[in-house]
Image (spheres, helix red, strand yellow):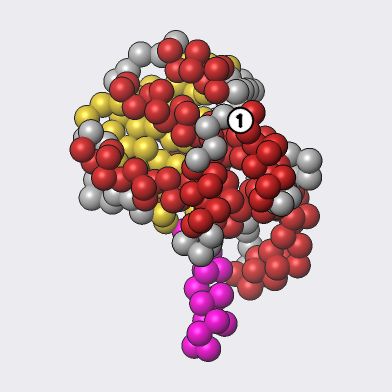
């Protein structure tokens, strides 16, 4: 079995690499930092479409799964980079690697619980879909009047919606796509999320007892990448320790 993964050097990506390796996968990693325990590292800046195209040309398929995990947190001053890496770069690499995916291969995209409002925000998501170049992002951000937190939320909304929008097209090609949406996870960027979402995140973590672990999210990613989930197509699976259920109880008075 052969896997491609982005964002493999740290956090959820590193945990996924360890689990893939334990299951005997040959792993190709696309990352700006060198990850451990992979068979091939292709250095690439996921904010640079030309670099992504060059990097994708360096590898040969067929691959059994593509795990799009690279992402930037909601950090002040990074709005353009967040949209470029978290969404535009993900889509660019996926399109470049689609011809190198085996029949029946799985695409797994790391989204976020922060993208849960994609249906309510679908018109702005569609406007992001229409952005053709990273060079247009500054104008998009100005026109939409969004800061780094809104850019992060939008990037993850777009990841979820892109999977839904491309499900039928990918089925016709013998491929399938799903996404995972973690809530707070104890990685090196947890502080960025605490700063961005403040007391709301702290309360949610306190109510469910703890943040998630990278290994727990990686387990779900590997399930979606495996044949065990072959009839799951176009879904977003939330992994949040119960946060969404508690929020629904509050909202609905259950």
Q: Secondary structure at mark 1?
A: helix
Q: Which residue is mark 1?
A: 134
Image point (52%, 69%), residue name: 244
Q: Is residue 242 magenta?
A: yes
Image point (66%, 50%), residue name: 144
Q: Is residue 132 magenta?
A: no
Report whether residue 39 is seen: no
Percent across and percent down for residue 107 are: 37, 37
What residue range appears in magenta?
A: 238-254
Left or right: where 164 falls relative to 152: left
User: Farthest residue in the top direction?
Assistant: 58
Left or right: where 83 falls relative to 1: right
Percent across and percent down for residue 193 are: 70, 53
Report whether residue 30 is seen: yes
Percent across and percent down for residue 254 are: 49, 88
Image point (23%, 41%), residue name: 171
């Amino acid at each position: 079995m052969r896997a491609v993964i982005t964002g493999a050097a740290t956090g959820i990506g590193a945990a996924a690499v360890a689990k893939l390796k334990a299951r005997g996968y040959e792993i190709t990693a696309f990352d700006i930092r060198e990850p451990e325990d992979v068979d091939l590292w292709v250095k690439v800046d996921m904010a640079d479409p030309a670099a992504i195209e060059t990097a994708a040309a360096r590898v040969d398929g067929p691959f059994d799964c593509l795990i799009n995990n690279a992402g930037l947190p909601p950090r002040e001053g990074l709005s353009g980079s967040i949209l470029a890496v978290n969404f535009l770069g993900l889509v660019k690499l996926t399109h470049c690697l689609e011809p190198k995916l085996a029949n029946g291969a799985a695409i797994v995209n790391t989204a976020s619980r922060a993208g849960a409002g994609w249906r309510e925000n679908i018109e702005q998501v569609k406007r992001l879909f229409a952005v053709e170049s990273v060079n247009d992002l500054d104008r998009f951000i100005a026109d939409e009047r969004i800061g780094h937190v809104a850019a992060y939320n939008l990037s993850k909304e777009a990841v979820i919606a892109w999977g839904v929008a491309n499900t039928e097209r990918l089925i016709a090609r013998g491929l399938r796509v799903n996404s995972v949406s973690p809530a707070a996870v104890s990685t090196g960027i947890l502080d960025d999320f605490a700063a961005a979402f403040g007391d709301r995140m702290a309360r949610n973590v306190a109510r469910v007892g703890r943040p998630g672990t990278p290994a727990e999210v990686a387990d779900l990613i590997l399930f979606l990448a495996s044949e065990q989930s072959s009839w799951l197509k176009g879904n977003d699976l939330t992994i949040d320790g119960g946060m969404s259920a508690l929020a629904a109880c509050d909202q609905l008075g259950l």
